[in-house]
Amino acid sequence: MTEEKLKRLLNDAPDKGMRLVIERYSGLVISIIGARLRPPAFSGSDVEECAAETFAEFWRDRDGFDPSKGSMRSWIARLASNNANDRLRRYYRESGNVPLDEGADIAEERRIEDAIESREERAALVSALNSLGRKDRELITRKFFLGQPSKQIASDMGMTVSNVDTRTHRAIKKLREKLGDM
């Protein structure tokens, strides 16, 4: 079933549509959240709770999904990533503990957000990403926006790690050509 048909089903038969959304994307959501919310600070039930929050947020905002701006899969992945990051920040704030490796990730995220802050830069990046093929766009999204390792991407997409790395390298080269000096 295409995402467009799935969106229509969410409007026509909401319960059935939402079951299909959860069925189709729960593995992706759990893997994104699980990669961020790791033991010992977080348990499996924390990951499941965050996933449930992600699908609840999707349900509340489902009318905001615009296929012209990206796939439903990407949108749900971003919701999952944002929810996991929010939970991490809340944990760090409340506990006062920031492990060095996680602190570096948060600092890196802030630098990335600062680097693409202007509206024109974001629009140029979106345009450049949309110029890539579906598979290359998904590779870039998974690798750089969701922070997934090549091994996980390869497993999820039915590719070899070497193929993931090669295609990612080529996709980055295409993006650099499209973006120029930006």
Image (tube, helix red, strand yellow):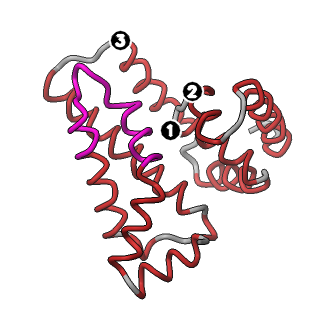
- The residue to which callout 1 is attached is 113
Q: How far apart are labels 3 and 1 at the CA level?
A: 20 Å
- The residue to which callout 3 is attached is 100
Q: How far apart are labels 2 and 3 at the CA level?
A: 19 Å
Neighbours of disc 1 within 10 Å: few (<14), some (14-19), many (20+): few
At label 3, the amino acid type is Leu
Locate residue 92, reporting x and y percent.
Answer: 22, 26
- The residue to which callout 2 is attached is 149
Q: Going 43% across and 64% down the picture, which residue do you hit?
A: 21
Q: Quadrant of the N terminus?
A: bottom right
Q: Quadrant of residue 96?
A: top left
**Left or right of 44 on screen, residue 103:** right
Q: Going 57% across and 27% down the picture, which residue do you hit?
A: 149
Residue extending farthest bottom: 12
Magenta region, residue range: 27-49
**Left or right of 67 on screen, residue 23:** left
Q: Nearer the viewer, mark 3 or mark 1?
A: 3
